[in-house]
Amino acid sequence: MSSAATGERMGVEWRLAAPLGLTYLAFFAAPLVILLVMSFSVDDNLGGFTIASWVKFWGDPFYRGVVWDTLRLGLVAVAVTTLFAYPIALLFVASSPGMQRLLLFIVLLPLLTSVVIRTFAWIVILSREGVLNQALLALGLTSVPLNLLQTELGLVIALTQIEMPLMLLPLITVMGQIDPSLSDASRALGSSRWRTFRKVIVPLSLPGWIAGATLVFASATTAFISQTVIGGARLVYLPTLIWQQAMVVYNWPFAAVASVTLLVAVLAGVSAFAMLGRFARTS
Amino acid sequence: MHNPSTLSDATSQPLTLDAVSHSYGDALAVDRVTLEVRAGELVALLGPSGCGKSTLLRIVAGFINQTEGRVIIGDRVVDPLPPNRREVGIVFQSYALFPHMTVAENIGYGLEARGESKATCRERVQEMLATVRMEGFGERKPRQLSGGQQQRVALARALAVRPRILLLDEPFAALDKNLRLDMQIEIKRLQRQFGLTAIMVTHDQDEAMSIADRIAVMSRGRIEQLGSPVAIYDEPETLFVNDFIGSSNRFEGSVETVASDLYGVRLASGAIWTVTSRRSFSKGDPVLVTIRPEQLALTSKAAPDTIPVSLKLSLPIGGELIHDVESPAGEAFKVASPRRPGASLDMSSSMHCALAAHAKPILFPRPAA
């Protein structure tokens, strides 16, 4: 192929990619740049240059605490979804095709309703007069209703249900591809069920878990609706903080600092999971 | 390099299946199978797919709990034991090597599960690598090995823990034809060397014939016949075994004369064959006579025990010529003759089919039409 033809082709490819490229520039890259510039601005007109907002954010233990709480919420959500996802995935793999379809439907069910409705449903379940407390009182497991709304426990319970499909779908896809005779081989060689799970199932399902953990982490740390509706005013995470600073206090530079921090924090978490995946593959 | 005293210390133990039955829901997969495998013996479970042979293997391994009957290894009923306590070694059809572990880790897996020390594991792994002639492959991953090498590793892994019974599940199905014979010899060698009691499941009669001491032919959850490969081939006890093993011709006929265990049978074409049988028949009984193609011969001379035939097709298969022939009575069958280069069949004269010398036709009762 002549260089002229190659040049021609390059030109055509550029023109084909241009609409999407321009859209990205205008609606993704540009706002990010504006956000970054805003975080160093004196006011919300992008005027002046100051690091005052950054100093205020990182110098205040309260805001540092919010960052830490947000990351911790993501990690706890990953841990709890993992705890529930593995047994369900094992059950799924061992089930008949008909049963698998039913399980998949149940797993996907949370995705079929809107986040807002799902979250309000959890209020009905978790509140002091809610379904859960009624059941616990009736069973005599507790004498006073538990306070679950506006607690991290309640939020984690709701997030776990809402984000379970994100963990389960990649996990069952990968686990379905594991040759069932590997477990048989492990058992026949003298391994208990638990050792088989630890030594064979977990390492081989790791790629699926990493994909699931990444999705759950990214979505739990940024779950604004669940965090505000169930966490209320008592629990403050980065998304809530950004909303308050931007829409209530109108301190846009400060909101920009919180936004950039959230972005970097989530990216850091996601790349940590990705690195874990690379490490697991090479070792 | 390897130390014979540690390799031959496997204590071979007999395996007994005592009236074992298993059903999946309403479907009976294994139907009152009783089988005694002697210590150090290799028995092949041979049958078409769905005959229950794989279910039986999984019952012995402990992956399935049979609905009825007992499995006894040595003098111990193992039914209450989970798979990890049965000390049974398995080589799977897919080899089931752990893809995330090296060859050495695969072989050491069972030893580690049994809590052997690191040093013992390392020593035993090296020993097993030498046994299956795979020294120097310890650090490879299974995907870097050929099919035959993977199978050697699978064997080494199963034998490393000194199992009391070795189970082979279609061990040669995934191998190339040329490699198959090598691995059959290899498995037979190791099984002898370790004095292992072994059960092999296969649907391939050649595999069963070549390495099994005895073959159990299975059909519909039952053992149709248990015997040496030669006995199974030469003296099939049922029509199923007769048809399943090798190729065989069937003739319809009726008993004309009876003299103790010697029966004169008149075939549809009018030929009369004299057949010995342990079954008893009376004069006039409708029977089926079966005979292997290589026990028939083509001749130009007519006799009372020959069938006039016309030749439809001759196929050279290896060292044999297989003739597809038909009698005027409509009986179609096959005759095999040794193929000699240059020699050709005399097509000019009329042709007849006779029993070859030492031919042993077999009589089966035939339901009257």
Image: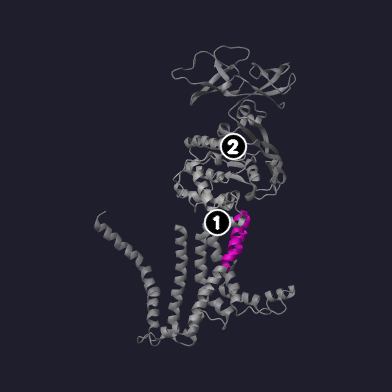
The three-letter amino acid code for the residue at tag 2 is: Gly
Q: Which residue is mark 1?
A: A199
| Position in image of residue B122 (x %, y %) | 50, 49
Give the letter of the chain under mark 2: B
3D distance between C-alphas at marks 1 and 2 = 31 Å
Residues in magenta, as a range: A80-107
Q: Is residue A91 magenta?
A: yes
| Position in image of residue B169 (x %, y %) | 58, 42
Q: What SS does tag 1 mark?
A: helix
Give the letter of the chain under mark 1: A
Do the residues at discs 1 and 2 belong to one chain?
Answer: no
Q: Residue at x 26, y 57 (%)?
A: A5
Q: Which residue is mark 2?
A: B195
Q: Residue at x 36, y 87 (%)?
A: A47
The one of B326 and B101 positioned closer to us in this rendering:
B101
The three-letter amino acid code for the residue at tag 1 is: Lys
| Position in image of residue A23 (x %, y %) | 38, 71
